Image (cartoon, rainbow, N blue to C red):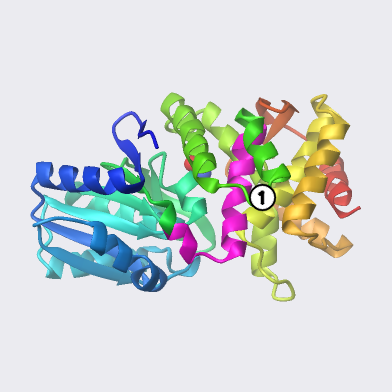
Amino acid sequence: METILATTYPIHFNEKAYVELARIVKENNYSSIFIMVDDNTLECCYPRFIQNFQTESPIEVIQIDAGEIHKNIETCVGVWNAMTELGADRKSLVITLGGGVLTDLGGFVASTFKRGIDFINIPTTLLSMVDASVGGKTGVDLGVLKNQIGVFANPQMVLIDPEYLHTLSSREIRSGTAEIIKYGMTHDIHLFNEIKDNPNVNLVDLIHRSIEIKNEVVTEDPKEKGLRKVLNWGHTIGHAIESYFLENEHKEALTHGEAIAIGMVCEAFISSKTQGFSIEKTNEIKQAITAIYGKTIILPEDVQPIMELLKHDKKNESGIVKFVLLKDYEGFVINAEASSELIKESLAFYNK
Ligand code: GLY
């Protein structure tokens, strides 16, 4: 599988990636290597990783607790302290082995330790393979505010090994699939069609194409001044739904992908009302999403709190909720607006 070249780093796939990893580590002559894992990846991914990783540099493993709740500055302090006690210096390397929480937090820890040391991302979930590990966003949450603290910093390389996907539940795979569907609708409809028409699709090609698309977008707009906002297709309403289900004790939390899948249905509806997006395609999206993710019930009393959460979306400007909307498949507008009535109608459309 062909290497993808980001501006300052390569994204290598499969066996070749381990060869390249060994080469980069040798070339840079790192004084020590800190492999960051969480409880899950220590058990499920680390044995495969260490079997395939060849180096003469000393290795230390640093384990953090799994889960978004631990993606905070206290966890970073724990890691910085551990690295200091273990003698990390400016020639040390951090390798992150995990999902988006780990690659975001590990990249942040590395890029701030002694004003910045090298790091390499090894995403082990589908979601982090196609999204978090590429594009240079690192950081942690501040209380309930997601990714409030962080820096843009690029890794030395990204290693994609689809074998790690075998450690995931089908629900986690479906969560990542939503991001692939997202790239399909905005950039390459083939991705959406493959997933929609073929439940047993081989994910490896779709991962490669998704990363190619993300890389093209972030290369053009690394700091999200404009174009990069397209990566938030489905996320405006999706994030509000995700937060609402997470915070509401009477609801079962949704995965990120489940929430943004609902977001894509709602935002397709808004697109059909304001951007000329076809109603047939809107119905096609609703049908495909419901077939993959099932139906989540959004009750009448859920609507107002979801509307309130929309006000905190990070794309908002001067208090106005901003959307990515579709004119057609592979044709989008950013910074679009929609009335509150229309947003409520879109939730009703999903529910119908
Ligand atoms: N996950 C969206 C981005 O990287 O910009």
Residue at 48% over, 69% down: 69
Q: Does the magenta stretch include residue 177?
A: yes
Bounds of the magenta segment: 164-185
Question: Is residue 274 positioned above or below 195 on the image?
Answer: above
Q: In which quarter of the image is residue 101?
A: bottom left
Locate residue 9, reporting x and y percent.
Answer: 29, 35
Residue at 30% over, 68% down: 47
The residue at which mark 1 appears reads as 260
Q: Can residue 318 be seen in this view?
A: no
Question: Which of the pair 149/47 is nearer the observer?
Answer: 47
Q: In which quarter of the image is residue 306?
A: bottom right
Question: Which amino acid type is shown beneath numbered disc 1?
Answer: Ile
Q: Is the magenta stretch mostly helix, strand or loop?
A: helix
Q: Can residue 294 be seen in this view?
A: yes
Locate residue 120, reporting x and y percent.
Answer: 28, 49
Q: Is residue 172 magenta?
A: yes
Residue at 86% over, 63% down: 299
Locate residue 331, reporting x and y percent.
Answer: 68, 24
Question: Is residue 336 positioned above or below 38 on the image?
Answer: above
